[in-house]
Image (cartoon, rainbow, N blue to C red):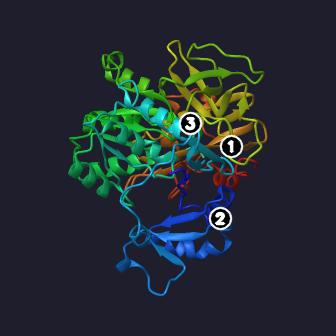
Amino acid sequence: MGAVLHTINPRLFPEQVIWIANHAEDRFLFVDLTFLPLVDAVRSQLTSVEKVIVLADKAAMPAGRDDLVCYEDLLAPEAGSFAWPALDERTAASMCYTSGTTGHPKGVLYTHRSTVLHALGTLHSGALDIGRDSVILPVVPMFHVNAWGTPYSAAMSGAKLVLPGAGMDGKNLHELIDGEQATLLLGVPTVWLGLLNYLDSISAKMDSVQHVVVGGSAAPLAMIRAFDEKHDAFLIHAWGMTEMSPLGTVNGPTRELLALPKEERYKRQLKQGRPVYGVELKIIDDDGKELPRDGKAYGRLLVRGPWITSGYYRNDDRSAFVDGWFDTGDVATLDEINTMQIVDRRKDVIKSGGEWISSIDLENIAVGHPAVKEACVIGVPHPKWDERPLLLIVLKEGASATKEDVLAYVGQHIAKFWTPDDVIFVADLPHTATGKLHKVPLREQYANHLMG
Ligand code: ADP
């Protein structure tokens, strides 16, 4: 209809919701009844919002609230047909703000054109292999890059789209997966940890699921193995960003991959995969020189393509946009056939005495320990080495392990200088609203841990 859909994350702090809604100049706010208290708390500070529309029928509307519009009332007087405007394909269709894992949220606009092209890009067998018989369950909120574009992919292909609502815990997900016979799941690793742990606890196997797309954060080896061995499901590792609509690379079940011995295949699945058609990748060093595709050299990952943003909404910062390429802020390797592997986010990589340590690699190894539920590695200041890794661990319920156990286990898989300087056991770890580890507060909390 020519309006721009801006999905917003209700789990952000109220100040962030206010900042984002005002920055985006949102005019009409559509909310579920559940979120009304949240809206009431911020309403007076929303400078551009004209109306709040509650997605409920009349009977469910709260009494005495003339300031709210009932969705059904809004629709009732309108005709059943609509004259769609002829819009330029580059008109804005939707927008999302980055989840702010490493800094202030930034707004990204998606056009009709980029949305259609991205959806097309997700469908074919070299990408997410979505077809008319797929039953897709994105356990990804709409505010996280439009649920990774799945509503559009589903509509375009005729696939069935199943939405989880608020029930993202293992039990609810299992019921939904079984009940709807989902074939393709999509989500961040944290969500699948919950599901896998729950399925273990009741010794259940998922039968309908063929593929589990994991992105947003790196998929650990233990998760790749668990989906394969326990549920006969292939974990498709994928990588993307809000700025990329989001899909960039996919590591799907090629014939070559399936022919490998299992352990070797799992290791290959740790890579985030090859670019989907339309997306180009390259890695450069700090001087801007392109680095070889040899699987070893690592550098700043740059991308370009028809569904990658060319700027941020109402933001003059052009530092990430270089000669038509977008600098992702990730550090990666590319191999001879263009398979990409994320080494780390540039802000998370640990610089120890001039050498780099990947927090992602360390975390992946640590969660392979049988007692470890979740692991987080941060670089903290060190008097001699500038920065050293600190390993934070959440243990599985009822499990126990000592610092020495964990270090001995991790030590089998890494170079000696990668060994974390300390292991700290915590009850839980902070996550962003999109389910990613939130390292910023941890780095603050432990800033002096190794300074003596
Ligand atoms: P934010 O940067 O605020 O978390 P996004 O959801 O857009 O917002 O995150 C994109 C970033 O997430 C990527 O630049 C990358 O660092 C990380 N990421 C996405 N997918 C993966 C993956 N499969 N493995 C490792 N990191 C990933």
Residue at image mark 2: 18
Total tally of numbered discs in the picture: 3
Asked if residue 259 lies left or right of residue 384, the reply is left
Q: Is residue 422 visible?
A: no
Of 227 and 82, nearer the camera is: 82
Looking at the rendered structure, the kind of residue marked 3 is Met
Q: Position of residue 423 (x, y in %)?
A: 57, 46
SS under mark 2: helix
Residue at image mark 3: 244
Of 430 and 411, nearer the camera is: 430
Q: Position of residue 159 (x, y in %)?
A: 30, 40
Residue 219 drawn above or below residue 202: above
Q: Residue at horizontal 37%, vertical 27%? A: 124
Q: Residue at horizontal 62%, vertical 72%? A: 42
Asked if the residues shown at circle 1 and circle 2 are in contact, with their CB atoms under 8 angstroms apart, the answer is: no
Q: Residue at horizontal 58%, vertical 14%? A: 293
In terms of image quarters, where does ligand 1 lie? top right
Q: Is mark 3 within 8 Å of ligand 1?
A: yes
Looking at the rendered structure, the kind of residue marked 1 is Tyr
How much space separates mark 1 and mark 2, taking CA atoms? 18 Å
Residue at image mark 1: 312
Q: Is residue 264 visible?
A: yes
